[in-house]
Amino acid sequence: MASLDLRLYVITDRKISGGRSHEEIAAAAIEGGATVVQFRDKELSGRKQVETALRLRDIARASGVTFIVNDRVDVALLSDADGVHLGQDDIPASMARKIMGNKIIGVSASTVEEALLAQQQGADYLGVGPVFPTGSKADAAPPIGLTGLAEIVRSVDIPVVAIGGISQENLVDVLETGVSGVAVISAVVAASDITQAARNLRAVIDAHSSYG
Ligand code: TZP
Ligand code: MG
């Protein structure tokens, strides 16, 4: 597995992008300093997912940015993505590992128990949240807050990316918990200027002492 820079993890979401495509979102976010792009589209057919993922992989690879596919191990492998991100209802990390080789496997966790299990099962990083209320995931678990986030960060050895309702306003508080990065949808994808929104978040992340 290549070294994993999780500082600014941008998840593509066409539904709140004002008509911009996954490719446009990814390119603009990368220009603004995204270190990871995750392709997330729960409505596209498998075929369209692979086609889109192949294009996104090229866009990310050209800039040395890590490319992750949400949910679908098959789409991740067929597009030669850097990895996959699995939720609690997706294939367990331990089983995904059998076919993912040394590619990156991320797992969503909302509790210490889920986090420890994912770590034990070989996850490379955790997406932990929702930290704050979010409008971007219909079936999101209740927010765990900064306290819940900090507790999980303390409990595991693998890197944690915080997710859910993260914005320029609460970013410093989130970084103070010791996370390796933040994952965002609306703070970047819903912005009129995606590149500038990503750049603003990166500026705060880079100025934060842990990353100095
Ligand atoms: N998983 C937990 S919260 C969330 C996902 C995919 C949505 C995050 O979106 P936003 O707009 O950054 O709150
Ligand atoms: Mg999922």
Image: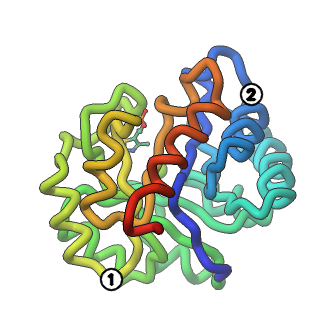
- For label 2, the SS is loop
Task: Choose the circle earlier in sequence order: 2 or 1.
Answer: 2
Which one is closest to the eye, mark 2 or mark 1?
1
Image position of 179 (left or right of 5) = left
Residue 13: percent from left, percent from top: 58, 32
Q: Could you say which is closer to the camera, residue 98 or residue 184? A: 184
The residue to which callout 2 is attached is 21
The residue to which callout 1 is attached is 157
User: Looking at the picture, does residue 47 appear above or below residue 160?
Assistant: above
Residue 35: percent from left, percent from top: 62, 57
Residue 199: percent from left, percent from top: 60, 41
User: Looking at the picture, does residue 211 appear above or below residue 132?
Assistant: below
Residue 72 in sight here:
yes
- For label 1, the SS is loop
User: Looking at the picture, does residue 154 appear above or below residue 110?
Assistant: below
Q: Could you say which is closer to the camera, residue 178 or residue 54? A: 178
Residue 195: percent from left, percent from top: 67, 34
Q: How many marks?
A: 2
Q: Amino acid at mark 2?
A: Ser
Instruction: Say which quadrant the N terminus sits in.
Output: bottom right
Which residue sits at x=61%, y=18%?
192
Distance CA(mark 2)–CA(mark 1): 36 Å
Which residue sits at x=57%, y=68%?
5
Which residue sits at x=53%, y=71%?
105
